[in-house]
Image (cartoon, rainbow, N blue to C red):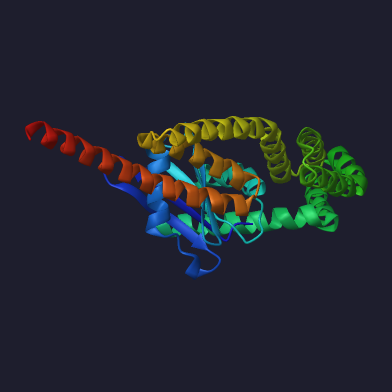
Amino acid sequence: MPRAIILYEIDPSFGPNVIAEYYLKQEDKLSPTILKDFSEKHDKKKLLDITIREGDNRYFSKKITSESLEKQNLYLSFILQEGEDIVSVKSIFNNVEETVIQNYTNDKSKMTHILNNAINSILSLMEKLQEPKIIKETINDRTKKMLDDGKLSEARELIDLGEEIPEKLAAEVKIAEDLLNQEFYRKAKKSFLKAAELAELIQEEEIATFLLNKGEQVGFFPDLIKERENLYKEVEKVATNLEINQLQIYDNFVEPIERLIEISLTFEEHELVDLLIKLKNNTQRASKLAIELNNIDENIRELLKKI
């Protein structure tokens, strides 16, 4: 579950502006630096979702897409809990996004309350996934209402499903998580989607959406691995050119390294991320120095011509 949810906009003239925010701990405030970094990557590089790591903290941001909202420049950012996997965070985005779209208002206080409710909803969802008993209790409450409303056949059907589906759902989620940890991504996707179908049977729509999204996220992993292999080849090619002293080539490092950082964050490869961030910082510095050296070289050549 996220430590915080921040709703912000990116104004074409004034840049990023926080609309509403809710933090479990007030010291977790989203810094202007991170917000500016999100804004630049969303706006200039046209990235729909972004993950940033700064020290021990990880931040996620994604654009809200909705035809019903008048505002088309809204974004949601999460600050992640320690040890929380980025795949799960990306998977709950749709649930929070839907809540924001349905309840959006210009009243900052009301929007803060909506974000608070979203965190509570996520907490409830995670508890249900870990404990079938909680799902059974919600099914009981739902069937009581059905009986009160005279929906006898629907209530009986849900009661029957409630006897066995919660345990099957919990077992299937565990299988999916185990397969994910073992890096059997295609099998993990199938298992998450199967769990989503079970959740739909007992009308647990939030759980179903979460598991469906997580399955789709995991399904992209083989493509990400292939992309990462190609990026490493691109970096190696640039490094070869450096060996023949083409200093201006440093600038070509930055874009593939940034993407490698994004992919490595998805796979929770934190030591590699630290290495890549250092490499990116050094190549950016080297690129500036190479440009400066090139300018000095041109000045020297011009001066030599006048001697």
Q: Is residue 25 above or below residue 50?
A: below
Residue found at x 17% / y 34%: 301
How far across and how far down the image is residue 10, in percent? Answer: 36, 44
Q: Position of residue 59 (x, y in %)?
A: 52, 53
Quadrant for the N terminus in the image: bottom right
- Depth check: 281 or 138 in front? 281
Which residue occupies the extreme left position in the image? 306
- Relative to 240, residue 22 above or below: below
Q: Is residue 129 left or right of residue 57?
A: right
Residue at image coords 60%, 50%: 272
Q: For this rendering, which residue is in front, 265 or 288?
A: 288
Residue 95 in view here: no
Q: Quadrant of the C terminus?
A: top left
**Nearer to the camera, 128 or 106:** 128
Compare residues 41 and 285 and report the one nearer the observer.
Answer: 285
Residue 120 in the image: above or below residue 14: below
